[in-house]
Image: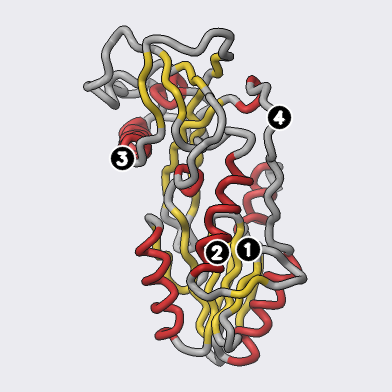
Amino acid sequence: MLGPGASNEAECNPLSYREALEQSCYADWEDTMGAEFRSLLENNTWTYCSMVRVGAHLIGCKWVYILKTNPDGSRRYKARLVIKEYEQTDDGETFAPVAKLVTLRMILALAASNGWEIDHMDVVTAFLNPPVNDDIYMLLLEGIDWLDPSKPASITVCKLNKALYGVKEAPHLWYRHIDEFLLTVGFKKSVNDPNLYLTSDRELILLLYPDDLLLTAKDLQRINQAKKLLHARYSMSDLGPARKFLGLEIDRLPEGHLKPHERRFILKGLHRFNM
């Protein structure tokens, strides 16, 4: 397990497992690593193997740490186990569309002018939903054993069953997976933005980017109905009324208007350059 750090430096994004171990907030990184790893195991992300296919290319992995600041100033620690994309040699389909910024602005303007509700959801470990099509073998890294005591100590390789973050095809596989689901439950895709979905009566709008969802409708009942469908299919985090999306902070004013801004981002830049 992670041990206490010797440094009292300000919390930041560690660049490696060793660096996370040395930070004073090691317990927070430990908790989020444990949660991430349990999610990987529950999703049957890989199968441990003692032998690999002849000629197979072994790809390494690493932890990526992100310290996020919520709109209320509280901190959220995220750790993600990712495969080293630059070591992957397969040339499968990798393209996945992302929502246009002009579409986001349009949705915010529409919600503000009509007084619609607008909520934010996040798909937990989105890329772990679709299966991978190719044989991808991953070398397990340092610090795995304490997260999964059931793993044989001699096993250092696993075969991926799901599109772990970093797999080149992962964004494409995930988009195809959720797109098929949304169309199946009655959404219609916009011809102008492949990440914009509407109900047939156009009274509920959903924006996808790529595992964050923005839902807007004239009443919460319609939004909650859509949330129920999404929860039934995917593991979701309901973030409630949209307050931050793609780095854009969203304030709702008393008269119902929306005020999008990037105040925290600007202040962070000023602080970085001692201004």
**Disc 1 element:** strand
Are the residues flagged by discs 4 and 1 in contact, CB closer than 8 Å? no
For disc 4, the marked residue is 91
Q: Residues within 10 Å of mark 2 (few under 14, many from 20)?
A: some
Q: Earlier in the sequence, mark 1 or mark 3?
A: 3
Number of numbered labels in the structure image: 4
Q: Earlier in the sequence, mark 4 or mark 3?
A: 3
For disc 3, the marked residue is 42
Q: Residues within 10 Å of mark 3 (few under 14, many from 20)?
A: few
As shown in the figure, which amino acid type bears the numbered disc 3? Answer: Glu
Are the residues flagged by discs 2 and 1 in contact, CB closer than 8 Å? yes
For disc 2, the marked residue is 244
Q: Earlier in the sequence, mark 4 or mark 2?
A: 4
Spatial CA distance of label 4 from label 2 is 35 Å
**Disc 4 element:** loop
Above or below — where is 180 with respect to 158? Answer: below
Which residue is nearer to you in this view: 134 or 247?
134
Of badges 4 and 3, nearer the viewer stands 4
As shown in the figure, which amino acid type bears the numbered disc 2? Answer: Lys
